[in-house]
Amino acid sequence: MRELRTWIEIDEKALRHNVAEFLKLIPKRTRFMAVVKSNAYGHGLVTVAQSLANLTPDTYHLSPRLWFGVDSIVEGLRLRREGIKNPILVLGSTLPARIPEAAEHAIALAVSNFESLRAHASVKNRPAFHLKIDTGMHRQGFFPHEIKKAAAFLKASRLRPEGIFTHFASAKDIAYPTYTLEQLKKFKDADRELQKNGFTNMMRHAAASGGALLFPESHLDMVRIGMAMYGYWPSEESRIKNKELRVTLKPVLIWKTVVAEIKKIPKGAYVGYDCTERVSRNTTMAVLPIGYWHGYDRGLSSTGEVLIRGKRARVLGRVSMDMIVVDATDISGIKVADEVVLIGKQGKDTVWGDAMALKISTSQYEVLTRINPLVKRIIV
């Protein structure tokens, strides 16, 4: 990568391994949705989709084809432009003006309120859609007590949902299963109500990564796998529970940069903006051409660690917009252009997104999705 100062490598074998692990868990009749929303959780929307689009039923027991879950019609259209022909469901909201585009490009939409239902009823060329039920997450979705009214509107407007779905609030937290099981019950009640009104043969889906791992009764007709597909456990509880499941997950994203400059500063010298750090020894420091603009969180100032020549180097002082400085005093032989791992493995050591998240009191979801989309993603 001599022409790049920073780049991301996507481990295709790890990605496909993680998909295969979930296909062992779910029934063969259950569809698999690869959730690639929000730039595939930072991994690259098109990069990931192209890697998975051609998985064959013979190899992965997929029948029918793998689905993709996106956040917006914009993401769905991008996949269509890139030649992705798999079924696509927009999980987020869609503006009424864009509904005809969804129909034109065979993109299914989530419908979660009466305004959206009316918008769908008003267009001639109607896309497939999935009704979202709010069973306790309390974001998008029809409340259970609104199902009868929704069913009446559907019949009057001659609208037929392709699917019905919900989202669990705490399925990844096995210590408190009651809420998830209550949500699943409400969802099944809503499904029965719709079936009583003649809406049968709808695809039902509820489980994301946590639900698929911890609540097999929630597998239904499709599971929507996001974070776990990228190699991270959605919670510590799910990691612990895995002792019974024997699932192995492999992180997919490796983020790298290079040493741009090396210099020595004396004991007592200050480093970076606002003189927030003063070195306690004669120090060799390495300047790396990445910063918070690239997605390396400012909270990692003076605490983040990177890998150079297989050894850890701590961030010195503030993370800047486009640069960080690390302490390379104990790394022998370091030189300009040496490869640096920000997230991933080098030698025998690792720095993964979940460990990085602990340092700044957040989750790996935020660490990964906030990596700038302009950083080049490369399949390896």
Image (tube, rainbow, N blue to C red):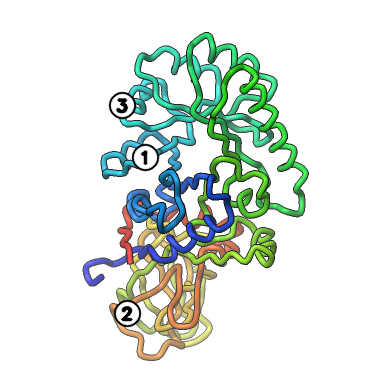
Mark 2 or mark 3: name the one nearer the start of the chain. 3
Q: Name the residue under label 2.
A: 338
Mark 1 or mark 2: name the one nearer the start of the chain. 1
Q: What is the x, y in percent for residue 21?
A: 53, 61
Which of the two residues, 32 or 72, is positioned nearer the viewer here? 32
Determine the CA span between mark 2 and mark 3.
49 Å
The image's mark for residue 75 is 1
The image's mark for residue 44 is none
State which mark lies toward you, 1 or 2. Answer: 1
State which mark lies toward you, 1 or 3. Answer: 3
Give the residue at the far left of this rendering.
3
Q: Mark 3 points at which residue?
A: 104
Which of the two residues, 193 or 242, is positioned nearer the viewer here? 193
State whether residue 363 is above or below residue 302.
above
Q: Estimate how packed mark 1 is, as few (under 14), some (14 to 19) or many (20 or more) residues with alpha carbons within 10 Å.
A: many
Q: What is the x, y in percent for residue 373?
A: 35, 51
SS at badge 3: helix
Determine the CA span between mark 1 and mark 2.
36 Å
